[in-house]
Structure formats: C-alpha cells, structure tokens
C-alpha cells in the first residue's frame, strides 16, 4: 500500500505547485517530507517554470490573489486574462480592505471601520496562514500614511507609524520632517526600507508672498534600521501634484517609477541602477505615447494607478479604475515597446466613483511577485510610532 511519504519528490513538487499559497500551511502538516520541501520554497521554483506570478490585489474592498501569465504576449499570442480569486476562509474575508502593502512575504492591510474616518491594521502571513491585528496607541485615521519594512541587522519587521514585530508596546519617535508625504502615494518596500513620493513643506509667513511656486516631488526613504528618514533624492522627472506618479519594486532589487504629465499622453517608466537610502540613479525603461493607441487624450489617475513591470519583456502593467456613465470597472493596461497596448477588463466595480474616495478604492496591486515567508507574526512584534505631524 502506497503512503504519502512514498511519493516521489517530483510528484510532490507538482502537487505543491497546485496548492494556493494561502493553503500551504495546512499542507505542510501532512508529513515531514512535505514540510521540508515547502520550507525550501519548491513552490516558488515551480511557479517560475510556469511563467506565472502570484500577486495580491484589492478588488471591491476585498483582498484577492492574482495570477498573471505574460508568456508569449509579444509574439502574437493572445493574452490570457488574469486569474483573480478572493481570499476566503480567513479573518480578512469579513472586513473591507482599503490599502495593502507587501514586504518580505508579509502583507500589511489597512481596513475600513464602521466609522468612516477610522481604520484598523492587520498583518498577514499568507504562507503560514497567520494574522495579527495591530492595536493603536490612539485611533488610526483614513489619511494616515503607513509602510512596512524591517531592521536589516535584527530582521525585525516594523510598520511606519511605527510598529516593530517583537513586543506589544508603542514608542513615539522624535522625528522632525521638512518633507510631506502625500497620503495617496503609497510607499514601496525595498531591501527593508520604504520609499515615497514627497514634497517640501511650504510655510507662508506673515508679510511674505501670498503664494509660492509648487515645488516638484522628490524621492524620500525611511530607514527602518536607523529609524529615520533619509535625505531627499532626485526623481528622474519633475513631478507635480496633478501629474500621475507611482512606484513599484522589482525582485526586491530595484525601484521602478511610472510618470505621466497632466498635460501629456506620454507615459514614462524608469528603473534604478543604484538605490540606497541616501543615493539613487535612474535609467529609462519605457516611453510610449498613448494618444495614437487610445484615440483620445488618455490619462491614468494621478491618485489611483498602481503598476509593475516585466524587465525581460519590456512591458508595464498598469491597474486603475475606469468609469462609464452607468458603472465603473477595474482595468489592467499592458503597454510596451513598438506601440504594444492592450486593455484587459478585470470585472465590474461595486461602487460608483462619486460615492467613494478614489484613493480608497482603486485596484491596488502589490508590485512584487509573492515569495513565501517563515516569519511567525504571532510570536514577534515591537511597536513604534512617529507623531502624525512628522510623517504626513
């Protein structure tokens, strides 16, 4: 009689490759061999061979898994619509999620409370199936800015506002910040640090000029090891408040920046060749004029779009919500070299744009392909908090 431990490693690898990442925790308890194989991340290697990438996205305030297959799209093959599945059987299934941040295999979710201006935080490890609700020192508010990162020396995971995964108390950091982080620009985690679009704070003094020209945005980092912001770093373009601009990460190695001027149809994507909390350098990745492809002056939402890139295929996939007279839809736009352009519908949105803030709804997508984490969030956590006036 054949038992589970008698199965070949190749067969077990194929079985594990078909198990949803958020169900793998139950599979690991099947036997020691399966537990060992999952720990060396056979699952990820199998996924890579299939040219598919697992990401997480928000759709209708629900956290969903998304598999996207870009294989063959530039060789005339038809693009296969993404597989999007709502996360079920977990505490996240019973709440409205408005924002999601990914770092090192963990997800930080911002949820919407019954009181419209209040929010809650929960950290989720999809691989281990663990969730942890983060209790505030005082209320969380809708316009708060959050980020997820870690101390590179001690591998302690932390949340900006700030929460460290190792005790259960909050600490207030004494931080004076001359730069304001725009709340609708989501930070991106890279190598344990988080990077934001930010602008210099403007103070109008009595007797001075009534207005000051708007400063362009800069790149600002938060170092979770030193627990402080880095110096302002240059973006590859001059970005202003009405322009579209958003960040994504690539394999936890590079940053990518998408930019579209409010007065132009050209979309630019840049990637870093060097990125540290105190230094950055950029090279162009992609530039495309959308007007000939769409037939009109097309603009991505300046406070809603999220994206990721495929470096090998020179393709960017941009996600946003599109509105019609009667309803609105989640949409993915694939743009690439030589005029490659494809619009993919991701289903109808539950609410009309007039009834909800755009920054709370757009289909946010974690830019990194998911890699499992063995961090036990139920056993660790130090909490730290910066004063609200210091990090907005």
Image (cartoon, rainbow, N blue to C red):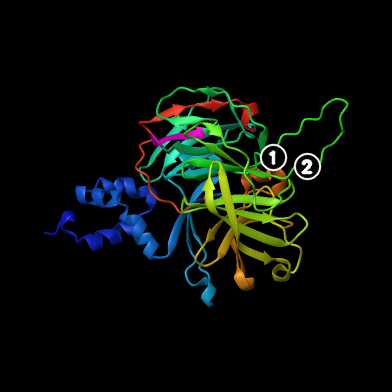
Q: Is residue 158 magenta?
A: yes
Note whether 232 is above or below 43 in the view shown. Answer: above
Mark 2 residue element: loop
Mark 1 residue element: strand
Quarter in which the N terminus is drawn: bottom left
Counting from the top left corner in percent of width and height, residue 286 is at 61, 63
> Quadrant location of residue 298?
bottom right
Counting from the top left corner in percent of width and height, residue 379 is at 35, 31
> Quadrant location of residue 119?
top right
Q: Which residue is mark 2?
A: 214
Quarter in which the C terminus is drawn: top right
Say few, some or many: other residues with alpha carbon within 10 Å of mark 1 (under 14 / 14 to 19 / 20 or more). many
Residue in view at x 73 percent, y 47 percent = 240
Q: Is residue 177 visible?
A: yes
- Considering only order in the chain, which callout, 1 or 2, is on the residue closer to the N terminus? 1
Q: Nearer the viewer, residue 300 or 64?
A: 300
Relative to 207, 52 lies left or right? left
What segment is highlighted magenta in the picture?
A: 153-159
Marks 2 and 1, Cα distance to the nearest angstrom? 9 Å
Counting from the top left corner in percent of width and height, residue 241 is at 73, 45
Most distant residue in the bottom direction: 76
Tally of numbered discs = 2
Residue in view at x 40 percent, y 28 percent = 166
Q: Which residue is mark 1?
A: 199
Relative to 54, 316 lies left or right? right
Q: Nearer the viewer, residue 296 or 225?
A: 225
Instruction: State if disc 1 and disc 2 touch (CB < 8 Å).
Output: yes
Q: Is residue 262 magenta?
A: no
């Amino acid at each position: 009689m054949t038992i589970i431990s008698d199965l070949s490693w190749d067969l077990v690898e194929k079985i594990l490759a078909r198990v949803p990442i958020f169900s793998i925790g139950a599979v690991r308890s099947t036997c020691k061999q399966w537990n060992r194989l999952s720990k060396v991340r056979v699952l990820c290697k199998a996924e890579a061979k299939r040219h598919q990438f697992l990401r997480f996205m928000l759709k209708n305030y629900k956290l969903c898994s998304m598999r996207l297959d870009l294989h063959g799209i530039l060789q005339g093959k038809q693009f296969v619509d993404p597989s999007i599945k709502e996360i079920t059987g977990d505490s996240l299934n019973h709440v409205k999620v408005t924002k999601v941040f990914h770092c090192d295999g963990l997800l930080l979710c911002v949820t919407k409370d019954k009181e419209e201006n209040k929010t809650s935080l929960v950290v989720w490890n999809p691989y281990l199936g663990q969730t942890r609700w983060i209790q505030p020192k005082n209320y969380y508010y809708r316009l708060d800015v959050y980020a997820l990162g870690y101390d590179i020396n001690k591998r302690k995971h932390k949340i900006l506002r700030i929460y460290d995964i190792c005790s259960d108390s909050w600490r207030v950091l004494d931080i004076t910040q001359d730069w304001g982080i725009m709340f609708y620009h989501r930070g991106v985690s890279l190598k344990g640090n988080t990077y934001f679009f930010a602008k210099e704070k403007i103070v109008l003094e009595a007797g001075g000029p009534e207005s000051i020209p708007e400063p362009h945005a800069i790149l600002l980092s938060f170092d979770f090891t030193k627990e402080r912001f880095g110096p302002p770093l240059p973006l590859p373009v001059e970005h202003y408040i009405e322009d579209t601009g958003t960040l994504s990460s690539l394999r936890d190695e590079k940053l990518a920046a998408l930019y579209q001027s409010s007065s132009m149809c050209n979309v630019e994507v840049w990637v870093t060749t060097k990125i540290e909390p105190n230094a950055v350098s950029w090279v162009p990745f992609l530039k495309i004029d959308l007007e000939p492809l769409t037939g009109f002056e097309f603009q991505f939402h300046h406070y809603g779009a999220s994206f990721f890139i495929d470096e090998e295929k020179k393709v960017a996939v941009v996600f946003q919500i599109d509105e019609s007279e009667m309803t609105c839809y989640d949409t993915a736009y694939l743009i690439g070299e030589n005029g490659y352009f494809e619009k993919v519908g991701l289903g109808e949105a539950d609410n009309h744009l007039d009834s909800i803030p755009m920054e709370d709804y757009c289909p946010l997508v974690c830019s990194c392909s998911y890699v499992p984490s063995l961090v036990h969030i139920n056993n660790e956590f130090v909490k730290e908090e910066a004063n609200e006036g210091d990090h907005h």
